């Protein structure tokens, strides 16, 4: 009997499972596919598995289609799932056309827009895991897709999917997802489990991959931007992240003050609606510790979801409390900060502490994503009509203080860089016109060919915020108290960063304009063969790129010490003179075409003061602390075809062969060594001091990655400079040669520059400048200032400012750039400008035969500040020192 009962129970179970799978469709669950439950402790699906799972699900369900939206930096396909009803699936192009129409109220009247909003489907984009260690959303995405495909949702999935088209990207940084998973799996079960990786999780940008969303340096930002503003035009977009472990369990919008002023009020109200619904649905289902209106501000343009706001797309952010990648953590109740321990109106249900696991993150993220899908469905027509309405406002309404247009004159110091800026604007969806005749605007006459960005356009909030100067509101902790720092940049003005002339025009003007489909690339013809010499103007960044390629081919080259005046051209001091050999003649047409840069012919160079130039052997230091500025430096080098060798700690130290020790000779292999912005302490020891507030983020690394270049490395650098090497220190790395308390023990005898950081130890109440753009004066007759204008804009971000003095011994110094006496701020926020007035920003320090170049701001900031690249490029191409 017993056996029979067992048999009966088993067959009932099998039948139930069969019927269940029949009703649910024959889709494979993530658990069945992965052989573990999504979010299980210490288990991760890697990108290959995620991609394969989505493809399998798409084969099994008519509600899912997988599209390829681009290729990652390291060559992986970036996938996105389209999830909607089967009826919609057959008509995707039709629905895409509807939203495209709604975006341009110049061709659609409100009546028609109402009709289209009824007929259309709301498009919702969910992007996951841009930050690779914030890995939960990449796992959650599989379960979310499965639930939607099988109808296992808190709403009627058939109804909802018939009104909503969901675009779900399980990770928008597949390279990093794979790296983090591989690293985690390698060390699971060891003392390094869940610890940090010694390199960036995006090849160039690391965490800064979410700072690139108006510049589009990275192929991942390009791929998603195409989805957002070119191919799919979603009305709602959420980007799912993670934050620290001990505060709230989840942040969801609304955001906190201040907002970017150009963003539409209806946009913020829509964000509020979605956020409030998420908070409500989460609370209803017992999720504790959800907060809104804190930590994350409305003042930023460079992040994935923020750039949506500026394009009239309801951009949302979710931030889950993290675990150690996939390893659970226990949080003592006493470790929860007071502000997340007490009840507050935007935080009515604090989490009490205890165990916290990856599956918790998955559950919250599923709940918030499903809530947002429901909101999209409930307000479908509104979202579509608001989409139209916001573009209509952008085109029709000029608010107080808003300009009529921005003009980018055709006459530029660095025309190829100006074209590059226009290219970036165009890709971000900005409408640009070009003048077919001369025209007057403001009080100026602009020549034919000048570019006009009219503010009356669908993406006005974005265009204006990128082109105008930011004025960050003076927000204090309390009246007269210390400033409250912005979330990221206070200022980002693109023309200032790129060194492109751009005028703000307040009042309407008339001009004969033509809308640009593509940014024109001027045709450049190399000078005729019979010129014995070629000149490349140092005012253009592209000239440097051409110079590097020519040096690579061993061209004979010089840098002019003064301005050059030819028959038909003028070139600035520091311009490149190239001997026009048959080899050069062969290369030049391709190079000039690639870089859209002109070259001029010259008959005779005997009267021109000049210094010979050699192909520099460049070393770029890479610590094991995953330094983003190092990544961006590589990005600039790769972009400009500048060859370099990556140097690690061991390259600064003696090598042992048997019992013999071979001292390191850096000068034998390198002419220039570059240290990207990084704290001197980390460069020297691999860690910040144990008392620093950053120390706890520096978890132990496997022994081969521990330590820094050490005193031995700094000794080797001293010898390198003595022998004529050029040591380049960017921003924080300048601290390497200051005798500060923390690093005093590392500094070799006599190796301290006659320079001091005047901002060291200065309190926030006296001086405060969160990532902002400042004015500098440049000596463009000095080799490091070649090609720069006399007045330029520099990106100041946790930067030093220098005082120099008359040196002694074998030292000398030359101030290349400095801050002016007053009106230093160009864009962003600056308090206490007196502290840096008349202080040096770039110093060329000479020691024995070599140089130490201190660049005290972010001259290649996130590969955005093209306007100050030349300080770095000049350091690499320092004329041969005799
Ligand atoms: Zn993040």
Image (cartoon, rainbow, N blue to C red):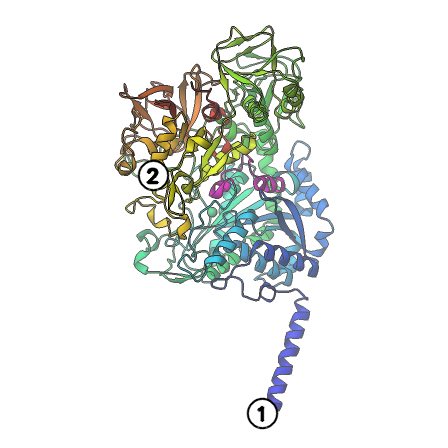
Q: Nearer the viewer, residue 341 or 692?
A: 692
Residue 440 locus on image (x, y percent)? 58, 12
Q: Which mark is residue 712?
A: 2
Question: Which of marks 2 and 1 precedes in the sequence?
Answer: 1
23 displayed left or right of 836 = right
* Nearer to the camera, 801 or 377: 801
Q: In which quadrant of the rendered image does the C terminus lie?
A: top left
What are the residue bounds of the magenta stretch? 204-227
Q: Is residue 67 left or right of residue 371?
A: right
- Circle 1 residue: 2
Residues marked 1 and 2 touching at CB (< 8 Å)? no
The one of 82 and 175 positioned closer to us in this rendering: 175
Name the side, left or right, on which 267 lies relative to 850.
right
In the displayed structure image, the side of residue 549 where residue 349 appears, left or right: left
Mark 1, mark 2: which one is toward the viewer? Answer: 2
Callout 2 environment at 10 Å: few (<14), some (14 to 19), or many (20+)?
A: some
């Amino acid at each position: 009997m017993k056996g029979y009962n067992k048999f009966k129970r088993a067959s009932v179970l099998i039948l139930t499972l069969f019927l269940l799978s029949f009703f649910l469709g024959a889709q494979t669950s993530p658990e069945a596919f992965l052989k573990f439950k999504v979010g299980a402790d210490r288990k991760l699906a890697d990108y290959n598995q995620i991609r394969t799972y989505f493809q399998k699900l798409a084969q099994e369900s008519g509600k899912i289609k997988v599209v390829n939206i681009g290729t990652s930096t390291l060559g992986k396909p970036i996938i996105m799932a389209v999830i909607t009803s089967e009826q919609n699936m057959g008509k995707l192009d039709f629905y895409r056309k509807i939203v495209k129409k709604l975006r341009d109220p110049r061709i659609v009247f409100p009546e028609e827009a109402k009709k289209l909003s009824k007929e259309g489907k709301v498009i919702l984009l969910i992007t996951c895991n841009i930050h690779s260690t914030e890995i939960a959303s990449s796992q959650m995405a599989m379960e979310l897709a499965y639930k939607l495909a099988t109808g296992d949702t808190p709403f009627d999935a058939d109804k909802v999917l018939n009104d909503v088209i969901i675009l779900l990207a399980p990770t928008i940084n597949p390279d990093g997802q794979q790296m983090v998973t591989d690293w985690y799996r390698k060390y699971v079960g060891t003392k390094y489990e869940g610890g940090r990786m010694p390199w960036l999780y995006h090849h160039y940008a690391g965490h800064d991959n979410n700072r690139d969303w108006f510049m589009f340096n990275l192929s991942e930002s390009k791929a998603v931007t195409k989805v957002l503003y070119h191919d799919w035009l979603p009305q709602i977009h959420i980007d799912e992240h993670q934050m620290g472990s001990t505060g709230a369990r989840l942040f969801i919008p609304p955001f906190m003050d201040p907002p970017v002023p150009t963003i539409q009020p209806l946009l913020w109200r829509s964000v509020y609606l979605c956020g409030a619904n998420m908070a409500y649905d989460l609370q209803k289902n017992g999720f504790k510790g959800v907060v809104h209106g804190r930590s994350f501000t409305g003042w930023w343009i460079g992040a994935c979801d923020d750039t949506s706001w500026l394009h009239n797309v309801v951009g949302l952010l979710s931030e889950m409390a993290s675990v150690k990648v996939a390893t659970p953590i226990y949080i003592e109740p006493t470790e929860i900060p007071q502000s997340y321990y007490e009840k507050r109106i935007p935080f009515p249900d604090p989490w009490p502490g205890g165990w916290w696991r990856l599956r918790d993150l998955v559950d919250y993220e599923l709940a918030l994503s499903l809530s947002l899908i429901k909101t999209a469905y409930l307000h479908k027509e509104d979202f579509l009509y608001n989409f139209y309405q916001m573009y209509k406002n952008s085109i029709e309404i000029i608010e107080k203080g808003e300009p009529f247009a921005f003009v980018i004159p055709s006459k530029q110091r660095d025309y190829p860089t100006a074209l590059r800026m226009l290219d970036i604007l165009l890709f971000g969806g900005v409408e640009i016109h070009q003048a077919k005749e001369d025209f007057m605007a403001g009080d100026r006459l602009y020549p034919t060919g000048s570019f006009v960005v009219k503010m009356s356009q669908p993406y006005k909030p974005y265009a204006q915020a990128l082109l105008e100067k930011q004025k960050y509101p003076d927000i204090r902790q309390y009246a007269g108290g210390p400033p409250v720092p912005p979330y990221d940049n206070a200022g980002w003005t693109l023309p200032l960063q790129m060194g492109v002339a751009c005028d703000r025009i307040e009042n309407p003007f008339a001009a004969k304009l033509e809308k640009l489909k593509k940014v024109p690339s001027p045709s450049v013809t190399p000078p005729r063969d019979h010129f014995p010499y070629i000149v490349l103007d140092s005012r253009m960044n592209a000239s440097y790129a051409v110079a590097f390629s020519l040096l690579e081919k061993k061209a004979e080259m010089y840098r002019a010490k003064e301005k050059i005046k030819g028959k038909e051209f003028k070139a600035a001091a520091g311009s490149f003179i190239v001997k026009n050999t048959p080899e050069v003649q062969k290369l030049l047409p391709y190079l000039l075409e690639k870089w859209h840069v002109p070259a001029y012919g010259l008959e005779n160079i005997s009267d021109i003061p000049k210094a010979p130039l050699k192909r520099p052997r460049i070393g770029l230091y890479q610590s094991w602390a995953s330094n983003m500025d190092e990544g961006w430096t590589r990005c600039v080098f790769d972009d400009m075809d500048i060859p370099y060798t990556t140097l690690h700690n061991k390259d600064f130290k003696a090598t042992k062969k048997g019992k013999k020790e071979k001292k390191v000779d850096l000068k034998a292999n390198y002419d220039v060594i570059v240290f990207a912005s990084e704290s001197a302490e980390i460069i020297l020891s691999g860690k910040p001091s144990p008392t620093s507030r950053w120390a706890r983020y520096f978890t132990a690394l496997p022994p081969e990655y521990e330590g820094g270049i050490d005193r031995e490395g700094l000794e080797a650098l001293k010898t390198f400079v003595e022998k004529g090497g050029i040591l380049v220190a960017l921003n924080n790395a300048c601290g390497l040669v200051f005798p500060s308390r923390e690093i005093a023990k590392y500094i070799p005898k006599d190796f301290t520059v006659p320079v001091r950081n005047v901002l060291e130890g200065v309190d926030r109440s006296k001086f405060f400048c969160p990532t902002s753009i400042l004015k500098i004066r440049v000596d463009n007759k000095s080799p490091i200032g070649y090609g720069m204008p006399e007045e330029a804009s520099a990106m100041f971000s946790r930067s030093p400012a220098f005082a120099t003095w008359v040196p002694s011994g074998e030292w000398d110094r030359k101030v290349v750039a400095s801050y002016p006496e007053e009106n230093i701020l160009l864009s962003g926020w600056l308090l206490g400008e007196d502290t840096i007035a008349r202080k040096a920003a770039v110093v060329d320090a000479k020691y024995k035969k070599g140089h130490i170049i201190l660049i005290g701001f972010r001259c290649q900031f996130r590969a955005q500040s093209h306007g100050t690249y030349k300080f770095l490029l000049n350091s690499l191409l320092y004329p041969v020192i005799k």
